[in-house]
Image: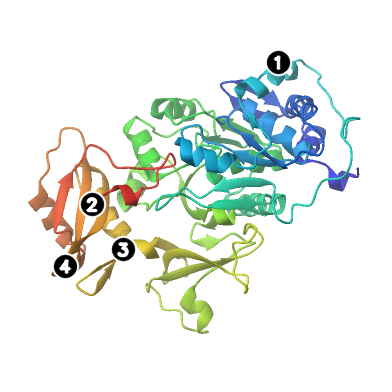
């Protein structure tokens, strides 16, 4: 096997043997140790399985990294499983998998990886044959978040993951001492790609099995991370918990939901640099970061593509994406992926996402993006979270209603909220009714589950 064919973990162990690969509660592994553990785990996998798919039901951590790279050493298609899924959704994801790797299967290999001086060469004697074709399967199978449905299978290749890592590094920078903090599920593309970006650059993935506000704040204030990726709800909660001028944090990558001006002001006051991003599972995470597509990606509005010179700043239209990060089978015959997301081109040329096409509320013949109304609500004093929906109405077709989660110590002042919104929204976009609720239905990564609002 030539150097060009080296598995990613073998290359990282050769180039950066003593760098920390994974920093997690279940273990801290250097790249040499991780490669040794992954190789030992790979030796337990059989040759020529009936299915190349291998499910990994583990939280973010050292054991997950061992199972991931061990599976890839034996040419398996990895299927990360979120243990919090309901039984039916879990069964769909497990269909066709060779086996399910859990803590009992992967954790024992951590002990042998912690001894100093662990070394492994690749391929070992047990490795036979060549890697099977991934033309149909890809190298990892993830599912869309399912914020408007059950989710869809997405097959990503090593090429997709590589271009994502390169594009992210160009957009965000990537110092050699990078420590990327993430508490997102590995069954979500945002959590999974922290592992792949890190192994390709030889940097450190600082991962936690779940998002705990105080733990995240403590890690950042202790200088344990240089970058972190969160959704706006997470950042807001960390600011509430006292996140203030963390000493080594150079960047917060913020995506997954609209970013309100109020949240940006709070972050700036706390000395936290924020870069907004828009991405999706079908495009291997980031598509547009800081208003611009990744260097390997094209992202345009449909009208810009169909009619040359039709750019109309501030006019919402569907976002189309093209490039080497697109998953297998998601692009149309012309190579473009129609995202179903609405975006606007700002006068400075930047691209901003304003919501989903399917979420658009048509009230009295006017189109309203619920995310824009939600952003205005969350910016008001006393509102911690908000969701906007269209409700069938005989007069308007759909009338706009809002559900809000109030900050502690605040009572609902519906008339006051409506009056405030009239100063920033068109009259037809102001909710006809605002109701206080204890919480809103969200996915583990913070996306609103709109189908549950009713």
Q: For mark 4, does the 10 Å Cα neighbourhood hold few (<14), some (14 to 19), or many (20 or more) residues? A: few
Q: Are marks 2 and 1 in contact (CB under 8 Å)?
A: no
Q: Nearer the viewer, mark 2 or mark 1?
A: 1
Task: Residue 224: give x, y in percent of width and height.
Answer: 54, 28
Describe the element under mark 3 as helix, strand or loop.
loop
Q: Position of residue 443 (x, y in %)?
A: 41, 42
Q: Are marks 3 and 2 in contact (CB under 8 Å)?
A: no
The residue beneath circle 4 is 427
Label 1 neighbourhood size at 10 Å, few (<14), some (14-19), many (20+)?
A: few
Which residue position holds label 2? 377
Q: Position of residue 296 (x, y in %)?
A: 65, 61
* Residue 279 appears in view: yes
From the viewer's side, name the closer residue of 99 and 307. 99
User: Do tag 4 and tag 1 residues touch (Cβ < 8 Å)?
Assistant: no
Residue matched to label 1: 111
Measure how far apart labels 2 and 4 are at the Cα level. 15 Å
Q: Nearer the viewer, residue 295 or 223?
A: 295
Q: Nearer the viewer, residue 391 or 430?
A: 391
């Amino acid at each position: 096997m030539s150097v060009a064919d080296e598995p990613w973990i073998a290359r990282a162990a050769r180039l950066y043997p003593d760098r920390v690969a994974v920093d997690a509660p279940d273990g801290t592994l250097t790249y040499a140790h991780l490669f040794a553990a992954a190789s030992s785990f790979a030796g337990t996998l059989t040759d020529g399985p009936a299915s190349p798919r291998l499910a990994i039901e583990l939280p973010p951590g050292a054991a997950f990294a061992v199972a991931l790279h061990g599976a890839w050493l034996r040419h398996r298609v990895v299927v990360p499983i979120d243990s919090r899924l309901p039984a039916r959704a879990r069964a769909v994801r497990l269909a066709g998998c060779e086996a399910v790797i859990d803590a009992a299967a992967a954790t024992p290999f951590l002990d042998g990886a912690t001894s100093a001086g662990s070394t492994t060469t690749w391929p070992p004697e047990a490795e036979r044959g060549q890697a099977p074709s991934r033309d149909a399967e890809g190298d990892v199978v993830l599912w869309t978040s399912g914020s408007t449905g059950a989710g869809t299978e997405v097959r990503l290749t090593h090429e997709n993951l590589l271009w994502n890592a390169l594009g992210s590094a160009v957009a965000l920078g990537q110092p050699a001492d990078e420590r990327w903090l993430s508490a997102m599920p590995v069954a979500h593309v945002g959590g999974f790609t922290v592992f792949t970006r890190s192994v390709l650059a030889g940097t450190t993935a600082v991962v936690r099995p779940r998002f705990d506000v105080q733990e995240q704040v403590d890690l950042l204030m202790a200088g344990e991370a240089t970058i972190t990726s969160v959704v706006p709800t997470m950042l807001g909660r960390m600011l509430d918990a006292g996140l203030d001028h963390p000493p080594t944090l150079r960047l917060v990558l913020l995506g997954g939901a609209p970013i309100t001006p109020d949240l940006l002001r709070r972050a700036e006051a706390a000395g936290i640099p924020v870069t907004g991003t828009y991405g999706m599972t079908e495009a291997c995470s980031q598509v547009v970061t800081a208003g611009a597509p990744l260097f390997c990606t094209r992202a345009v509005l449909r009208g810009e593509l169909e009619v040359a010179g039709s750019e109309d700043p501030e006019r919402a239209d569907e976002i189309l994406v093209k490039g080497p990060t697109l998953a297998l089978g998601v692009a149309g015959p012309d190579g473009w992926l129609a995202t179903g997301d609405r975006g606007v081109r700002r006068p400075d040329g930047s691209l901003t996402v304003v919501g989903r096409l399917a979420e658009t509320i048509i009230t009295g013949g006017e189109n309203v993006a619920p995310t824009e109304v939600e952003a205005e609500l969350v910016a008001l004093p006393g509102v911690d979270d908000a969701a906007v929906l269209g409700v069938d109405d005989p007069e308007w077709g759909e009338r706009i209603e809002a559900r809000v989660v109030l900050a502690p110590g605040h009572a609902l002042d519906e008339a006051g909220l409506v009056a405030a919104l009239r100063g920033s929204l068109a009259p037809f976009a102001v909710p006809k009714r605002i109701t206080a609720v204890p919480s809103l239905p969200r996915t583990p990564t913070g996306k609103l589950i709109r189908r549950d609002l009713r």
